[in-house]
Amino acid sequence: MRTSTWARQHLAALRALLVLTLITGIVYPVAVFAVGRLPGLSDKADGSLLEVDGKVVGSSLIGQPFIDAEGHALRQYFQSRPSAAGDGYDPLSTSASNLGPEDIIDTTVAGSATTKPSLLSTVCTRSKQIADREGVDGRRPFCTPDGLGAVLSVLGPRDADGEVTRPIAVYSVNERCAEHPVPFLASYRGVPVRCAENPGGYPEGRIVPIPGDAPTDPAVPADAVTASGSGLDPHISPRYADIQVRRVADARGITPEQVRALVHAHTAGRPLGFLGEPAVDVVALNLELDRRFPFQG
């Protein structure tokens, strides 16, 4: 290759580099920044930040917990939905739990006595905690009264389809004997149900979830006991907000009607009128409660 050809090719490459750097590194970022400064867009471009007395206290796009130092729910605030992002609503660790509907058996962490709850037991525990806090019926299908997954391991001979034909022994796999010596179910198909020596044991048995007598539409809604995909969602359903109204009103010394009015004001309808579901922004709602009806406790 002649020197002049080599030089022309490299000069062309250099010109392309300079032009693309100008377009993608300067023009495009400046254009995006300018669009973000347009009226109606600047707040969203800045992160929809929420301020109190000139101090940023959060974002209407990112949830946050309303708990004390021990992790207990603060009674004067609406509680957010659970979060699986880090220790909760961590923007640097946004994620879901990646657990699915088949995660129903608690396990013992190797080398320790710590129990790792299954997704089912986690949901059941949250439902019971919310029920105790809000004074509602916390029963859910496939949950024990104590807030664990109602799951049995049935041991015995099986037929060609894997069903146990004659149970020999039955264990409540999520009820450790040390904490739950009396299982949630006395017997299964005539065989006494035993507690589990170790959660996650008895894998050789047929795993049978027990629906129980809970209502098919629990009083505690699904968003109250499960995390969002990002773990940062600041919204809850109107149903979850509704069961919290009386507690918040009592804590702040106001009427439930006053609280419901603020809930309604911070409830967004379905986007475009048909997408998704109505949602209540918990962060903005709690800030408005503090502004309008300060907590005196």
Image: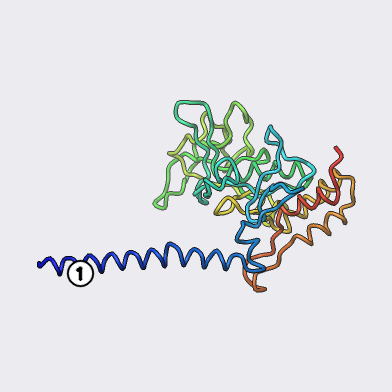
Image side of residue 114 versus residue 20, left or right: right
Residue lying farthest front? 4
Indicate the position of residue 204 as horizontal and vertical percent values: 43, 39
For image coordinates 63% across by 56% down, the residue present is 61
Q: For the N terminus, which image quadrant?
A: bottom left
Image side of residue 295 versus residue 172, left or right: right
Label 1, residues with CA under 10 Å away: few <14, some 14-19, many ≥20: few
For image coordinates 85% across by 51% down, the residue present is 292
Number of numbered tags placed on the structure image: 1
Above or below, 71 against 272 in this view is above
Front-lying residue, 3 or 106: 3
Indicate the position of residue 141 as horizontal and vertical percent values: 63, 50
Q: Quadrant of residue 275?
A: bottom right
What amino acid does circle 1 point to? Arg
For image coordinates 67% across by 45% down, the residue present is 127
Q: For the C terminus, which image quadrant?
A: top right
Indicate the position of residue 191 as horizontal and vertical percent values: 56, 38
Residue carrying label 1: 8
